[in-house]
Image: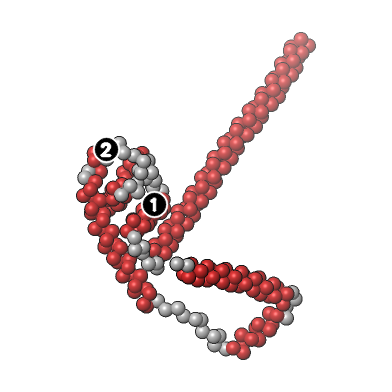
Amino acid sequence: MCKHCSTQTSSFQELRDTWKRKYDLSQGKAFQQHKSLWLNHVYRNWEVLEQSRAQHKENKKLKTRLSLIFDLVQRLLANRKPSFNYSVFLRERLAFLQVKVIRDGLPHQVSTPQQFIETFAVASNSEQNLLCELYLHNEAMPEDRKLNLIPLVGDIQIRAFVSFLANQLTWKNAFMSATHNKENCLLWIRAEPQNVVVFIVEHQRVLREPGMTGHIRKLQAAVLEDCQHYVKCYETSSRKYRKDRSTP
Protein backbone atom coordinates (compact mmCIF):
# COMPACT_ATOMS: atom_id res chain seq x y z
CA MET A 1 0.00 0.00 0.00
CA CYS A 2 1.34 3.41 -0.92
CA LYS A 3 1.93 6.13 1.61
CA HIS A 4 -0.81 8.32 0.17
CA CYS A 5 -3.43 5.55 0.45
CA SER A 6 -2.35 4.78 4.01
CA THR A 7 -2.77 8.42 4.98
CA GLN A 8 -6.25 8.54 3.45
CA THR A 9 -7.22 5.35 5.27
CA SER A 10 -6.12 6.65 8.67
CA SER A 11 -7.91 9.95 8.06
CA PHE A 12 -11.05 8.07 7.14
CA GLN A 13 -10.81 5.96 10.32
CA GLU A 14 -10.31 9.06 12.45
CA LEU A 15 -13.31 10.72 10.78
CA ARG A 16 -15.34 7.59 11.30
CA ASP A 17 -14.33 7.36 14.95
CA THR A 18 -15.12 11.04 15.49
CA TRP A 19 -18.51 10.67 13.85
CA LYS A 20 -19.23 7.54 15.91
CA ARG A 21 -18.35 9.33 19.17
CA LYS A 22 -20.59 12.27 18.25
CA TYR A 23 -23.35 9.89 17.23
CA ASP A 24 -23.07 7.89 20.47
CA LEU A 25 -23.03 11.12 22.46
CA SER A 26 -26.13 12.45 20.68
CA GLN A 27 -27.89 9.10 21.10
CA GLY A 28 -27.00 9.07 24.79
CA LYS A 29 -28.39 12.58 25.26
CA ALA A 30 -31.54 11.66 23.36
CA PHE A 31 -31.93 8.54 25.49
CA GLN A 32 -31.48 10.53 28.69
CA GLN A 33 -34.03 13.13 27.54
CA HIS A 34 -36.48 10.42 26.56
CA LYS A 35 -35.92 8.65 29.88
CA SER A 36 -36.41 11.89 31.81
CA LEU A 37 -39.62 12.70 29.92
CA TRP A 38 -40.92 9.18 30.45
CA LEU A 39 -40.12 9.26 34.18
CA ASN A 40 -41.77 12.68 34.56
CA HIS A 41 -44.82 11.45 32.69
CA VAL A 42 -45.05 8.32 34.82
CA TYR A 43 -44.52 10.33 38.02
CA ARG A 44 -47.18 12.86 37.08
CA ASN A 45 -49.64 10.10 36.25
CA TRP A 46 -48.80 8.32 39.50
CA GLU A 47 -49.19 11.57 41.44
CA VAL A 48 -52.54 12.30 39.80
CA LEU A 49 -53.66 8.74 40.49
CA GLU A 50 -52.65 9.01 44.15
CA GLN A 51 -54.47 12.34 44.47
CA SER A 52 -57.54 10.82 42.84
CA ARG A 53 -57.42 7.86 45.22
CA ALA A 54 -57.00 10.16 48.22
CA GLN A 55 -59.89 12.35 47.04
CA HIS A 56 -62.08 9.31 46.47
CA LYS A 57 -61.21 8.02 49.94
CA GLU A 58 -61.97 11.41 51.49
CA ASN A 59 -65.29 11.64 49.62
CA LYS A 60 -66.20 8.16 50.83
CA LYS A 61 -65.42 9.17 54.42
CA LEU A 62 -67.47 12.35 54.02
CA LYS A 63 -70.44 10.41 52.65
CA THR A 64 -70.17 7.99 55.56
CA ARG A 65 -70.16 10.88 58.05
CA LEU A 66 -73.17 12.49 56.35
CA SER A 67 -75.08 9.19 56.49
CA LEU A 68 -74.21 8.89 60.17
CA ILE A 69 -75.42 12.45 60.82
CA PHE A 70 -78.69 11.68 59.05
CA ASP A 71 -79.18 8.53 61.13
CA LEU A 72 -78.50 10.50 64.32
CA VAL A 73 -81.03 13.16 63.27
CA GLN A 74 -83.59 10.42 62.72
CA ARG A 75 -82.84 9.00 66.16
CA LEU A 76 -83.05 12.46 67.70
CA LEU A 77 -86.47 13.13 66.17
CA ALA A 78 -87.67 9.67 67.21
CA ASN A 79 -86.74 10.33 70.85
CA ARG A 80 -88.21 13.79 71.28
CA LYS A 81 -91.75 14.98 71.67
CA PRO A 82 -92.97 16.80 68.54
CA SER A 83 -94.07 20.39 68.69
CA PHE A 84 -97.72 21.16 69.49
CA ASN A 85 -97.52 24.00 66.97
CA TYR A 86 -98.06 22.76 63.40
CA SER A 87 -96.08 25.66 61.96
CA VAL A 88 -93.02 24.62 63.99
CA PHE A 89 -93.62 20.97 63.04
CA LEU A 90 -93.71 21.97 59.36
CA ARG A 91 -90.37 23.74 59.71
CA GLU A 92 -88.96 20.61 61.32
CA ARG A 93 -90.11 18.61 58.30
CA LEU A 94 -88.32 21.07 56.03
CA ALA A 95 -85.11 20.81 58.09
CA PHE A 96 -85.31 17.00 58.02
CA LEU A 97 -85.83 17.05 54.23
CA GLN A 98 -82.83 19.35 53.79
CA VAL A 99 -80.60 17.11 55.91
CA LYS A 100 -81.67 14.13 53.82
CA VAL A 101 -80.96 15.73 50.45
CA ILE A 102 -77.65 17.17 51.69
CA ARG A 103 -76.63 13.63 52.58
CA ASP A 104 -77.45 12.58 49.02
CA GLY A 105 -75.60 15.56 47.52
CA LEU A 106 -78.75 17.12 46.03
CA PRO A 107 -80.02 20.73 46.02
CA HIS A 108 -81.71 21.69 49.30
CA GLN A 109 -82.34 25.45 49.29
CA VAL A 110 -85.86 26.86 48.81
CA SER A 111 -85.37 30.59 49.43
CA THR A 112 -85.27 31.81 45.81
CA PRO A 113 -87.27 30.63 42.77
CA GLN A 114 -84.19 29.12 41.15
CA GLN A 115 -83.29 27.22 44.34
CA PHE A 116 -86.88 26.04 44.78
CA ILE A 117 -87.07 24.76 41.20
CA GLU A 118 -83.73 22.91 41.51
CA THR A 119 -84.76 21.29 44.80
CA PHE A 120 -88.23 20.43 43.49
CA ALA A 121 -86.88 18.83 40.30
CA VAL A 122 -84.84 16.16 42.15
CA ALA A 123 -87.32 15.54 45.01
CA SER A 124 -89.59 12.51 45.33
CA ASN A 125 -93.36 12.83 44.92
CA SER A 126 -94.05 13.09 48.68
CA GLU A 127 -91.22 15.60 49.09
CA GLN A 128 -92.65 17.67 46.22
CA ASN A 129 -96.00 17.72 48.01
CA LEU A 130 -94.25 18.97 51.15
CA LEU A 131 -92.53 21.70 49.16
CA CYS A 132 -95.92 22.79 47.81
CA GLU A 133 -97.29 23.00 51.36
CA LEU A 134 -94.23 24.98 52.46
CA TYR A 135 -94.77 27.34 49.51
CA LEU A 136 -98.44 27.75 50.38
CA HIS A 137 -97.56 28.69 53.98
CA ASN A 138 -94.82 31.10 52.85
CA GLU A 139 -92.00 28.95 54.21
CA ALA A 140 -90.49 28.63 50.71
CA MET A 141 -89.72 31.58 48.39
CA PRO A 142 -91.09 34.08 50.93
CA GLU A 143 -90.13 37.13 48.86
CA ASP A 144 -91.52 35.97 45.50
CA ARG A 145 -95.04 36.94 44.41
CA LYS A 146 -94.71 36.72 40.62
CA LEU A 147 -93.56 33.22 39.68
CA ASN A 148 -96.26 30.93 38.29
CA LEU A 149 -95.44 27.43 39.55
CA ILE A 150 -98.45 25.64 38.04
CA PRO A 151 -96.59 24.54 34.85
CA LEU A 152 -93.92 22.99 37.08
CA VAL A 153 -95.84 21.52 40.03
CA GLY A 154 -99.45 21.28 38.88
CA ASP A 155 -102.24 22.11 41.35
CA ILE A 156 -100.36 23.54 44.33
CA GLN A 157 -103.33 23.57 46.71
CA ILE A 158 -104.24 19.92 46.16
CA ARG A 159 -100.64 18.81 46.52
CA ALA A 160 -100.31 20.92 49.67
CA PHE A 161 -103.47 19.29 51.07
CA VAL A 162 -102.06 15.82 50.34
CA SER A 163 -98.89 16.82 52.20
CA PHE A 164 -101.01 18.12 55.08
CA LEU A 165 -102.80 14.76 55.39
CA ALA A 166 -99.49 12.88 55.31
CA ASN A 167 -98.01 15.23 57.90
CA GLN A 168 -101.00 14.71 60.17
CA LEU A 169 -100.32 10.97 60.17
CA THR A 170 -96.61 11.60 60.78
CA TRP A 171 -97.46 14.04 63.56
CA LYS A 172 -99.82 11.56 65.20
CA ASN A 173 -97.29 8.71 64.99
CA ALA A 174 -94.61 10.97 66.46
CA PHE A 175 -96.84 11.77 69.46
CA MET A 176 -97.66 8.10 69.93
CA SER A 177 -93.96 7.20 69.77
CA ALA A 178 -93.06 9.95 72.26
CA THR A 179 -95.79 8.79 74.64
CA HIS A 180 -94.61 5.18 74.37
CA ASN A 181 -91.02 6.21 75.08
CA LYS A 182 -92.11 8.29 78.05
CA GLU A 183 -93.98 5.39 79.61
CA ASN A 184 -91.57 2.56 78.80
CA CYS A 185 -88.06 4.01 78.60
CA LEU A 186 -86.83 3.84 82.19
CA LEU A 187 -83.71 5.46 83.53
CA TRP A 188 -81.49 2.79 85.03
CA ILE A 189 -78.47 3.17 87.28
CA ARG A 190 -75.47 1.00 86.58
CA ALA A 191 -75.07 -1.88 89.01
CA GLU A 192 -72.15 -2.05 91.40
CA PRO A 193 -69.07 -4.11 90.41
CA GLN A 194 -69.62 -7.79 90.93
CA ASN A 195 -66.40 -8.19 92.91
CA VAL A 196 -65.95 -5.05 95.04
CA VAL A 197 -62.70 -6.25 96.60
CA VAL A 198 -61.00 -6.60 93.20
CA PHE A 199 -62.25 -3.14 92.22
CA ILE A 200 -60.82 -1.56 95.41
CA VAL A 201 -57.48 -3.35 95.04
CA GLU A 202 -57.18 -2.17 91.42
CA HIS A 203 -58.05 1.39 92.43
CA GLN A 204 -55.38 1.37 95.17
CA ARG A 205 -52.82 0.00 92.71
CA VAL A 206 -53.56 2.85 90.30
CA LEU A 207 -53.19 5.42 93.10
CA ARG A 208 -49.71 4.11 93.89
CA GLU A 209 -48.46 4.97 90.41
CA PRO A 210 -46.24 8.09 90.25
CA GLY A 211 -48.20 11.31 89.77
CA MET A 212 -51.59 9.57 89.68
CA THR A 213 -52.82 11.05 92.99
CA GLY A 214 -52.16 14.61 91.84
CA HIS A 215 -53.80 13.90 88.49
CA ILE A 216 -56.98 12.58 90.13
CA ARG A 217 -57.09 15.59 92.47
CA LYS A 218 -56.93 17.93 89.46
CA LEU A 219 -59.82 16.07 87.85
CA GLN A 220 -61.86 16.27 91.05
CA ALA A 221 -61.12 20.00 91.40
CA ALA A 222 -62.33 20.63 87.83
CA VAL A 223 -65.52 18.64 88.47
CA LEU A 224 -66.22 20.53 91.71
CA GLU A 225 -65.71 23.85 89.91
CA ASP A 226 -68.22 22.87 87.23
CA CYS A 227 -70.63 21.70 89.91
CA GLN A 228 -70.45 25.04 91.74
CA HIS A 229 -71.00 26.91 88.46
CA TYR A 230 -74.17 25.00 87.59
CA VAL A 231 -75.50 25.22 91.16
CA LYS A 232 -75.18 29.01 90.97
CA CYS A 233 -76.90 29.05 87.55
CA TYR A 234 -79.71 26.91 88.94
CA GLU A 235 -80.17 29.19 91.96
CA THR A 236 -80.23 32.29 89.74
CA SER A 237 -82.79 30.69 87.42
CA SER A 238 -84.96 29.61 90.36
CA ARG A 239 -84.93 33.10 91.89
CA LYS A 240 -85.88 34.62 88.54
CA TYR A 241 -88.70 32.11 88.10
CA ARG A 242 -90.10 32.81 91.58
CA LYS A 243 -89.86 36.56 90.96
CA ASP A 244 -91.72 36.26 87.66
CA ARG A 245 -94.43 34.12 89.26
CA SER A 246 -94.89 36.56 92.14
CA THR A 247 -95.13 39.61 89.85
CA PRO A 248 -98.79 40.29 88.98
Between label 2 and label 1, give the one nearer the viewer.
Answer: 2
The answer to whether 89 appears left or right of 220 in the picture is: left
Of 55 and 234, the residue lying toward us: 234
Indicate the quadrant containing the N terminus: top left, top right, bottom left or bottom right: top right
Q: Mark 2 sits on what residue? A: 148
Q: Quadrant of residue 225?
A: bottom right
Cα–Cα span, label 2 and label 1 = 24 Å
Judged from the image, the secondary structure of the residue bearing numbered disc 1 is helix
The x and y percentages for residue 123 are: 31, 48
Q: Quadrant of residue 113?
A: top left
The x and y percentages for residue 34 are: 60, 31
Q: Residue furthest top?
A: 4
Seen at 24% across and 58% down, the residue is: 165
> Is residue 33 placed above or below 166 in the rendered structure?
above
Indicate the quadrant containing the C terminus: top left, top right, bottom left or bottom right: bottom left
The x and y percentages for residue 207 are: 70, 80
Q: Which mark is residue 160?
A: none
Mark 1 crowd level (few <14, some 14–19, many ≥20, 10 Å Cα): some
The x and y percentages for residue 52 are: 51, 45
Q: Mark 1 sits on what residue? A: 98
> Is residue 7 placed above or below 131 in the rendered structure?
above
Amino acid tagged 2: Asn
In the rendered structure, which disc, 2 or 1, sits on the residue that comes first in sequence? 1
Whether pointer 2 and pointer 1 mark residues with C-beta atoms closer than 8 Å, the reply is: no
Of 3 and 76, the residue lying toward us: 76
The answer to whether 240 appears left or right of 99 in the picture is: right
